[in-house]
Every structure is written in C-alpha cells, then in structure tokens.
Amino acid sequence: MTLIMGILNITPDSFSDGGRYLDLDVAIGHAEALRRAGAHIVDVGGESTRPGAERVDPDVERGRVVPVIEALAARGVVVSVDTMNAATASAAVAAGARIVNDVSGGLADPDMFAAVAASDADVAIGHWRGHSTDMYATARYDDVVGEVVAELQERVSAAAAAGIAPSRIVLDPGIGFGKRGDQNWAVLNRLDRIVGLGKRVLVGTSRKGFLREAIGDTPFGADAGAGSPAAGEPDLARRDLATAVTSVLAADAGAWGVRVHDVATTRDALTVRSRWREAS
Ligand code: PMM
C-alpha cells in the first residue's frame, strides 16, 4: 500500500495553501480533514520552500509547528515535520513528530543529522542543491538521473556517519528543488533508480510548477460552470488531478509514499490502481 502524506503548511506564503492554517484550531481542523480523507501521515511545515521564498526565523517556525504537532500527536495522528532546521526538528520530535522531513537532506543545517540521530524519528532526505532564493541556479546537470541518485547516496552516507540507522531513512527525489520542468520528468521517469537504492521512497509532486507547465493553468473551459475558478486564477483541480496521476505512477514505480495537498483525489486514484493491480 502506498502511504499518503497530507500537507499542512502553517505559513503565510506557501504557494497553494499558504496563510489559511496559521490559527491553531483551523490547522487542527484541516489536519483532521486530511486524515478523514485518507492521509496516513500529516506533514506539518512552518517555512515555505516555494521558489524565491524568504527564510523564516527558526523561533518563528518552531512557534508555528510545535503547538500543532502536540495537538495532533495527542489525537493519535502520525505527524512528520517539514523543516530544514535541526532545532525545529528536535522540538517537533519532542512534541510527538515521528518523521523529520528535510527537503535539504541535511545540507541546510549541519546539525540536522546529529539531531535526528539523537532521536528515534525517521528522516526523509530530499535531493536538494540550495535554498529557494536561487533554486534554479543549481539546475545544471549532465545526467540528471545519475547525479540525483549519486547525491542521494552521498546524503545516505552522511546520515549513516552521523549515527542514523539505515532503516530510518526515507529518500525523496526533491521534485522542483534545483530542477527545471524536464529534469523533474526525467527523474520521475527513472524513479526505479532511486527505489533501487533500497530505502523507502517518498515523492512530492503536488501542485508543482512542472505540472502546470505540462497541462496549463487555466480553467477547463469557458463553460466550466459554477464553482470553477475565476479568469486568471489557477485551476487547482487540474493540478490535483495531475498530482493524482503522478501518485499512481509513483506507486507503480515502487514509491512508499506520496506527499499531496488534495488527499481525497489521490486516495481515489490509488484505490483504483490497487483494484487494477490486485484483481485476479
Ligand atoms: N515539497 C515541498 C515541501 N516539502 N517535502 C518532501 N518530502 N518532498 C517534497 O517534494 C516537498 C516537501 C514544497 O511544496 P509545498 O510548498 O506545496 O509544501
């Protein structure tokens, strides 16, 4: 079974759901809705990683995520914390987070792997080449798949050297991080190479720019009807559908989990895939 990680961004500026969940009760309500929709894990983040985003003070980040994580863990929700800061990771684990989700794979904060090693949390290591402010400056590859695989392997070695047991490591190709549209597709096309590293693999494509580049970003048609986005507004339903398709393809390639905003659509897509695959 492919696990669904539902996204809860407690930030004023994340690109697709930002600003809505800064209030504690609202955040908890959304997490409960993610769980009802089928999320196995709720990923709580207090710093946006969208291209061009400003860094957030770690104290501000901690203040955003810790109360939410405490409340969710008390309700029995499996929580991951989306952070690049070791201090935030430690505080989040103390508050009940079971997975540290570091899109930078320990590169942004040199203390991250030691903090994880000192805890009993799992760690998701993303492929990353630098902060969002210069996200695409690093998107230069001779062999994008080979380089992503090699750089992930290097991070696994660093995590192991810090004392993190191999079984606690999850790998993530870091879709959209230091990669342009076609480079993301190339990595997804060879997701089997990352799965072949023998770790659980997590894939985050949800609502990302490379999907918009592929399918467009306008409503389905002028007669799309009531409830369709206004002219000029992005049609998130289209990106959520595209996300659900990538979830199915990631599952086929052996992914352990997918990180999504719209849990229900991806859950339905994964259920249909299971019926197809498991019928006899
Ligand atoms: N992408 C974002 C944030 N966190 N975590 C993992 N493990 N993988 C990702 O691809 C990933 C992530 C950026 O997206 P958002 O701003 O919608 O949360």
Image (cartoon, helix red, strand yellow):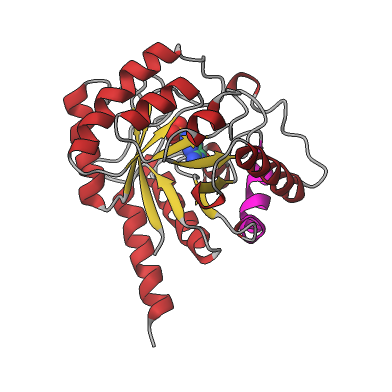
What percent of the width, then of the height, locates residue 81? 39, 33
The residue that appears at 37% across and 52% down in the rendered structure is 4
Span colored in magenta: 179-194
- Decide which of 207, 54 is in the foreground and name it: 54
As drawn, the residue found furthest toward the right would be 142
What percent of the width, then of the height, locates residue 130? 65, 26
Corner quadrant of residue 105: top right
The residue that appears at 50% across and 42% down in the rendered structure is 124
Q: Is residue 68 visible?
A: yes
Q: Is residue 14 visible?
A: no
Q: Left or right of 22: which side holds 189?
A: right
What percent of the width, then of the height, locates residue 237? 36, 45
Corner quadrant of residue 229: top left
What percent of the width, then of the height, locates residue 28? 20, 32
Position above or below: 69 against 38: above
The residue that appears at 49% across and 48% down in the rendered structure is 168
Q: Left or right of 280: which side holds 171?
A: right
- Label count reads 0
- Residue 181 falls inside the magenta stretch: yes
- Decide which of 199, 160 is in the foreground and name it: 160
As drawn, the residue found furthest toward the bottom would be 280
- Prevalent SS, magenta region: helix
Quarter of the picture holding the N terminus: bottom left
